[in-house]
Amino acid sequence: MRERLLLLIPVAGFTCLLVLFIVLWQALQHQNNSLQSLTNRLKELEQREEVNSRQLLEQQLGVLKNRQQKLQTDIQSLQTFQSENAKREARLLESLKQRIPLESIPEEISPDDQANPNPLTTDPSALSP
């Protein structure tokens, strides 16, 4: 009986090892399948992210183009306004030159006249004769 028991131990050990190998093999396949599905999911997310990034960049580019066009329009408006203003200023200067003859413009202005162009007296005694 002891001999049979000794013979049964290797057979039972081999069977246990075989079952253990099969269980480990299935666990390895399950892990591989999980890793493969996670890899596929990651690739999908990266593709979505690339598409989203591309769309976001296109939107930002559109906004920047609109801003650039608005700024160019503003610059043109300001340049037009500036040129019209310069023309008006030149016309006004020309009309002032025509109205006031050059001989009537004093050559030198005294420092008192420069400091007080419209002399007003605030002393009431100076007003009475």
Image (cartoon, grey):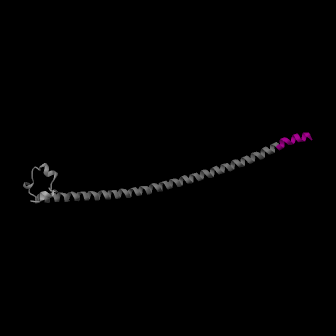
Q: Looking at the picture, how far across and down is residue 26, in whole percent? A: 72, 49
Left of 90 or right of it: where is 44? right
14 drawn magenta: no
- Residue 44 or residue 61, whichever sits in front: 61
Spot occupied by residue 111 in the image (x, y as percentages of width and height): 13, 49
At x 47%, y 54%, the residue is 54
Residue occupying the far right of the picture: 1
Assign the N terminus to one quadrant of the image.
top right
Q: Is residue 9 above or below residue 76?
A: above
Q: Is residue 98 above or below residue 29?
A: below
Question: Could you tell whether 89 is left or right of 48 in the image?
Answer: left
Magenta-drawn segment:
1-12
Q: Quadrant of residue 66?
A: bottom left
Q: Residue at x 9, y 52 (%)?
A: 106
In the rendered image, the vertical position of residue 61 relative to residue 11, given as above or below? below
Q: Please name whichever residue, 69 or 86, is drawn nearer the observer in this view of the structure.
A: 86
Compare residues 116 and 37 and report the one nearer the observer. Answer: 116
> Is residue 65 left or right of 77 when viewed as pictured?
right
Q: What residue do we see at 51% from left, 53% from top?
A: 50
- Image location (x, y in percent) of residue 98: 11, 59
The residue that appears at 63% across and 50% down in the rendered structure is 36
